Amino acid sequence: MVLVLVHVVNEYEMQTQIAHPTVDEMVDFILSKTHALDPRRRYMFIEWLCAHSSQVKCVINIRAGLNAWLDSMPAESTAWEYRTITNEINWWCDQDERTMDRLILDHLRRRK
């Protein structure tokens, strides 16, 4: 009886799994979240993104850079990078104004 129940549960989970987003859907979501950031947070996130991926670095079109980069990797790596990027966006959202001031000043000092 237990084996049958486990099989039924596994079948149900397989049928009801949410489809993984496509690379285009991931990029659309990343860009919508990025555009929702205030200018300082957006700037710092894009600086992080360019440092995180050489394929996105110095591209005129971030969408094209993200698409090329995420398309070039295996699905598991794409999913991991997607989570990393969205977590980073959320991290920038969570920073208070005082922390943002400090982070921007530190960033600008390092660029001199």
Image (cartoon, rainbow, N blue to C red):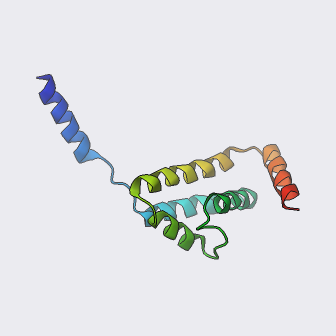
**Residue at figure coordinates x 21%, y 34% from the top left:** 9
The residue most toward the bottom is 60
Residue at (46%, 56%) from the top-left corner? 78
Left or right: where does residue 112 sit relative to residue 77?
right
User: Residue 10 in the image: x percent, y percent?
Assistant: 22, 37
Please name the residue shown 69% across and 60% down the image. Answer: 42
Q: In the displayed structure, would residue 40 be above or below residue 56?
A: above
Given residues 108 and 96, the one toward you in this image is 108
Horizontal relation, residue 7 to residue 87: left or right: left
- Residue reaching furthest top? 1
Numbered label tally = 0
Say if 50 sits above or below 81 in the image: below
The percent position of residue 14, horizontal first and vertical second, equals 24, 44
Residue 64 in picture, x, y percent from top left: 54, 73
Q: Quadrant of the N terminus?
A: top left
In the displayed structure, does residue 6 sit left or right of residue 79?
A: left
Compared to 65, does 17 lie above or below?
above
Quarter of the figure with the C terminus: bottom right
Residue 108 picture location, percent across and down = 85, 58
Against 94, residue 58 (above or below) is: below
Query: Toward the viewer: 46 or 111?
Result: 111
State the residue at coordinates (58%, 47%): 87
